[in-house]
């Protein structure tokens, strides 16, 4: 009855008024410690937040009388830790990826993608070219200091997205800006997973999992150069 999809997170008229504070507190800077955990750059924080809210709605989590930074960070960190463990348990064994034609084409597309900040906000230009027998499932996620700013699900034989995923008015100093691409490449009987993560200017990584082996790369290794996420320099 109380489905997550049917709830407006900030419409807490039917709930303890404290629930509205979670959206204010889970974006606190202490959550950055979660991102520093091994593997955190490759998980989708949207899933962690969704699972936390669903448990609240289903009374699996009892809200304290007063919600603060500490409570929210600790609670959400637990869900993020679960996602990290699941990610590590389901990925293929570490190994050397042989970059086939499909992988080479995708990396080339990522090189040509443009992600940069200007006076409008965070501009995203991502194009994944059509290839015979290939189908894409792609999710683009932008967060600011842990708070979800934009989540877009795209699919098809070709992806061509251009837009602003966060307004410049939200790009205040000392915030942590992240952008992630969760990409499934489906062809024949094979499924290649690629996750691309840029967290501020300190984390720029991608992983490729072809179902047999798993390998992690830095942007530099793949020749990917996106714009700076250093908000302190001004927009």
Image (spheres, rainbow, N blue to C red):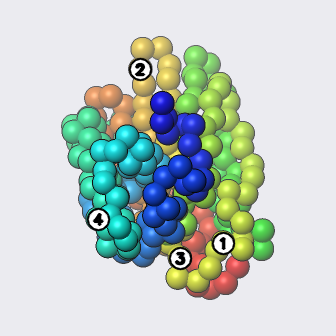
Nearest the eye: 123 or 105: 123
Identify which residue is drawn at 67% across, 30% down: 158
Mark 2 or mark 4: whose residue is earlier in sequence: 4
Q: Which mark is residue 175?
A: 3
Judged from the image, the secondary structure of the residue bearing numbered disc 4 is helix
CA separation, marks 1 and 3? 9 Å
In which quadrant is the C terminus drawn?
A: bottom right
Identify which residue is drawn at 50% across, 19% down: 187
Count residues near mark 3 (Cα–Cα under 10 Å), then give few for <14, some for 14-19, many for 20+.
many
Mark 1 or mark 3: whose residue is earlier in sequence: 1
Judged from the image, the secondary structure of the residue bearing numbered disc 3 is loop
Contact between labelled residues 4 and 3, with CB atoms less than 8 Å apart: no
Count residues near mark 1 (Cα–Cα under 10 Å), then give few for <14, some for 14-19, many for 20+.
few
Residue 207 visible at all: no
Mark 3 or mark 4: whose residue is earlier in sequence: 4
Closer to the camera: disc 2 or disc 4? Answer: 4
Q: Which mark is residue 74?
A: 4
Mark 4 or mark 1: whose residue is earlier in sequence: 4
Nearest the eye: 224 or 76: 76
CA separation, marks 2 and 3? 39 Å
Judged from the image, the secondary structure of the residue bearing numbered disc 1 is helix
Check the image and name the residue furthest to the right.
120
Identify which residue is drawn at 65% across, 25% down: 157
Count residues near mark 4 (Cα–Cα under 10 Å), then give few for <14, some for 14-19, many for 20+.
some
Judged from the image, the secondary structure of the residue bearing numbered disc 2 is strand
Closer to the camera: disc 2 or disc 3? Answer: 3
Mark 2 or mark 3: whose residue is earlier in sequence: 3
Nearest the eye: 46 or 202: 46
Q: Which mark is residue 190?
A: 2
Q: Which mark is residue 170?
A: 1
Closer to the camera: disc 4 or disc 1? Answer: 4
């Amino acid at each position: 009855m109380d489905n997550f999809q049917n709830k407006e997170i900030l419409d807490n008229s039917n709930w303890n008024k404290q629930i509205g504070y979670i959206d204010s507190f889970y974006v606190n800077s202490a959550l950055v410690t979660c991102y520093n955990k091994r593997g955190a750059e490759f998980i989708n924080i949207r899933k962690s937040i969704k699972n936390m809210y669903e448990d609240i709605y289903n009374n699996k989590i009892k809200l304290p009388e007063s919600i603060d930074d500490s409570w929210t960070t600790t609670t959400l960190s637990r869900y993020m830790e679960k996602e990290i463990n699941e990610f590590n348990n389901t990925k293929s064994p570490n190994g050397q990826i042989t970059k086939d034609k499909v992988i080479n084409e995708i990396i080339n597309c990522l090189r040509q993608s443009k992600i940069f900040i200007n006076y409008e906000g965070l501009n995203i230009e991502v194009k994944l070219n059509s290839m015979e027998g290939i189908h894409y499932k792609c999710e683009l996620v932008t967060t600011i200091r842990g708070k979800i700013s934009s989540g877009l699900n795209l699919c098809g034989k070709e992806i061509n997205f251009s837009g602003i995923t966060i307004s410049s008015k939200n790009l205040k100093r000392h915030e942590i800006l992240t952008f992630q691409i969760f990409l499934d490449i489906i062809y024949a009987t094979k499924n290649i997973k690629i996750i691309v993560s840029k967290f501020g200017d300190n984390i720029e990584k991608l992983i490729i999992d072809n179902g047999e082996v798993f390998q992690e790369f830095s942007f530099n290794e793949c020749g990917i150069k996106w714009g700076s996420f250093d908000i302190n320099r001004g927009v």
